Image: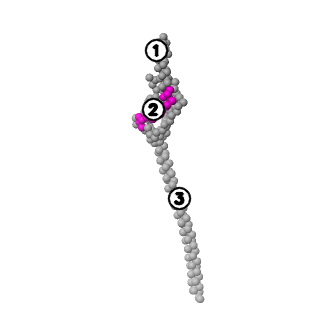
Amino acid sequence: MDSGDWIGAVTGGIGVITGVAGLVYAAKANTKSSAANTKAETANELAREANRFAEEANTMTRSQVGREVERHDVTWGGEWAGPGQYVVTNESTEYTAHRVHVRVTVDDEVQDAHREQVGPGESIELAFPVAAVRLMEERRELRERRESAARSAWPGLAPSDSFFGYSHWIEERVTWETDLGAPRVWEPRGNGLSTLGTLE
């Protein structure tokens, strides 16, 4: 073999070694590239999730601001509709109350009612059987007092029945939500002594 063949063989060998080394580095580069692509996809997914959370936070903030400035003028009124029948009415002319809870206490008798919606002018009725019995007793007692006063020798000295029956404690409380879900509470300052209905 002459020197040209040796140079050719050595050069060929170096080329093979270089080619194999290139393939090894290319394989490593492909592996790293694949790992980098996986990491990039994970980063993109995390970015999409972060954007979704940011949008949810923005929506919640907008909802909260909307609740704070929402106009929702609901007032309530409670009264006796008949013996032992107490009604609490949404006195608004335009607003509906949602997820309404009403609690009325008459002396020691407590009644609760729940409604999903109570529209303008609509009422919730609560039954108070003990109060109904007591009202009938008070009516009978008032009749007896009046009859006794009419038979009295001194009618002008008979006790007045003006305050008869005004000795019952009535408390009202209503909780509800506005159209946008803001919580509201109504507890009238008028809670206190009252009658159980008309005595006549």
Q: Is residue 25 magenta?
A: no
- Distance Cα–Cα, label 3 vs label 1: 95 Å
| Above-or-below relation of 5 to 81 | below
- Distance Cα–Cα, label 2 vs label 3: 60 Å
| Above-or-below relation of 78 to 32 | above
- Nearest to viewer (mark 2 / mark 3): 2
Q: Which residues are magenta?
A: 119-135
Q: What residue is rendered at 48% in x and 16% in y?
A: 148
Which residue type does callout 3 highlight?
A: Ala
115 and 133: which is toward the camera: 133
Tell me the tag on residue 43: 3
Mark 2 highlights which residue? 87
- Nearest to viewer (mark 3 / mark 1): 1
For label 3, count other residues whose C-alpha is less than 10 Å away and answer few (under 14), some (14-19) or many (20+).
Answer: few
Q: Position of residue 132 (x, y in %)?
A: 48, 28
Q: What residue is rendered at 45% in x and 42% in y?
A: 180
Q: What residue is rendered at 49% in x and 45% in y?
A: 61
Mark 1 highlights which residue? 150
